[in-house]
Image (spheres, helix red, strand yellow):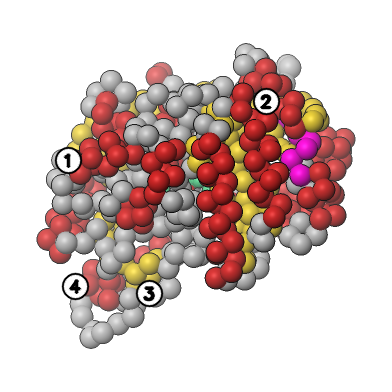
Amino acid sequence: MTSLSRRAALRGTMAAGGVALVAARTRGALAAAGASDGPASPLVLNDASRLNPTPVARHVVRGAEPFATLVDALRAELKDAAAAGRPVAVGAARHSMGGQSLPRDGTALTLDSRQIEVDPANRLYRAAAGARWSDVIRTLDPLGLSPLVMQSNHDFGVASTFSVNAHGWPTPHGPFGSTVRSLRLMLADGSVVTCSPAQNADLFAHAMGGYGLVGIILDLDVQMTPNLLLEPRTERMPAEAFAERFLAEVHDPKVVMAYGRLSLRRRTFFEEALLTSYRPAEPQPGALPAATSDSMVTRLSNDVYRAQIGYETMKSLRWAMETRLGPAIASGIATRNTLMNEPVANLHNPDPRRTDILHEYFVEPARFGDFLRVCRDIIPKAQAEFINVTLRYVAADRTARLAFAPTERIAAVMSFSQAMTSDGEADMRSVTERLIEAVVAIGGTFYLPYRLHARRDQVARAYPNAAAFAARKRELDPRGLFRNALWQAYFA
Ligand SMILES: Cc1cc2nc3c(=O)[nH]c(=O)nc-3n(C[C@H](O)[C@H](O)[C@H](O)COP(=O)(O)OP(=O)(O)OC[C@H]3O[C@@H](n4cnc5c(N)ncnc54)[C@H](O)[C@@H]3O)c2cc1C
């Protein structure tokens, strides 16, 4: 049993991106160790926002171990939590930003086995729930293989990526869940079921983008593809022209990855776009260079990225670097694995008084012009500093019960730098509510792994299956064992 010990506590902190654990010798630790030492400070976990300190009764970290041992241990944890009336929530890196992986006064489980088995004949790999994307790339890269879809930044857990149904920039794919062939899921009663789009399809659809609310994913069989050396093409254009050009590139069979960016300076906010698409370099070399993850260029760009906060001219400099200098000084040729193998550390925020908050909106390509107008109207007025937007393609997802892309969408991944004050928080809540209202009014949706600033009615409108999802969750988990802050805010 890997219950919380001092060392496990520290590992838990690391597993949570260095933000999680503030107390090592705690009531939870002592309880897990079967010891007692009178009143102790509570065990507090947090997530990537650093705005969700949440007391938990236990934090159990499970490392590499035989499958049967893991199953027995998790069953014991579920039984124990059910007897005590405590909620249970699983997490990996805890980079969601609204307590989606945090059970208040409950049992926090961190699945930390990084095991990956490759099945080249079927072009699949089996990843333990806690395997991180860096582990997947480290395993596949020497074999000349690559994940078919993964989210950007390699620090996150594979099961987490399925549980938020994240998307990435390989094209022309739907969200990550569309590349998962099957998975093993532990339900609230401790039973283990295999589910896939064909077998126990209803469970699969509720677990995909289900935020851990219907069960604990134990492992997943996921599609992979050959790794390739890729060559970028960049194109600068008026933002209004982006959607049409982006779709043309995404649907070009030669294009395998693509993304866009928009100008950020307030004076020309969202007026210009940059489209970057990648095609296989010709000819492909006999042996591909090994995947790397910490280029000098990335570190340099992070300095400029941070310097944008409060300095409009730095936004112009960054735009010039991206649109002109970058393409002029470097070929940009890289393997698929290197392009996706980016650590979150490259976005490191050194200012303890500020935090980076992500938003994400999904709009139909035909409504992209309306989306630009909505953003121009709302974002530049915010107190929070808007520091990035990346545009991605997401094919229609007809599987997930809580699908954010029920039809083909352009995803806008946005990053704000927010002051960690009550004013900063009130400003962020108001900007989020207004953006969601306007995006939903043009038929769009928003993403659920971030701050829980959407109103309940906004969730219901953006996710018409939300009530049915909650009803099915209650059937599968009648005692409400799997609960996190997302459940409490929108479904409880
Ligand atoms: C810098 C940054 C970059 C990002 N990039 C992208 C991106 O490119 N595309 C995108 O779509 N999203 C992106 N996100 C959002 C991110 O995908 C999610 O927050 C993701 O889940 C984080 O992984 P994690 O391991 O930190 O998950 P956690 O925060 O630990 O967990 C996320 C959810 O998954 C559930 N979960 C975790 N493990 C299991 C399990 N074994 N069984 C059942 N449920 C489980 C948790 O309970 C929780 O609800 C990004 C976030 C950040 C902060």
Image mark for residue 161? none
Q: Residue at x 73, y 16 (%)?
A: 283
Magenta highlight range: 269-275
Q: Earlier in the sequence, mark 2 or mark 3?
A: 3
Distance from disc 4 to disc 2, alpha carbons, whole Å, reads: 59 Å
The amino acid marked with disc number 2 is: Ala
The amino acid marked with disc number 1 is: Glu
The amino acid marked with disc number 3 is: Ala
Q: Which residue was labeled with disc 3?
A: 24
Mark 4 or 1: the one toward you: 1
Q: Are marks 4 and 3 in contact (CB under 8 Å)?
A: no
Q: Which residue was labeled with disc 1?
A: 475
Crowding around mark 3 (Cα neighbors within 10 Å: few <14, some 14 to 19, many 20+) is many
Furthest residue to the bottom?
A: 38
Q: Residue at x 44, y 64 (%)?
A: 52
Image mark for residue 243? 2
Q: Residue at x 74, y 29 (%)?
A: 240
Closest to the observer: 145 or 84?
84
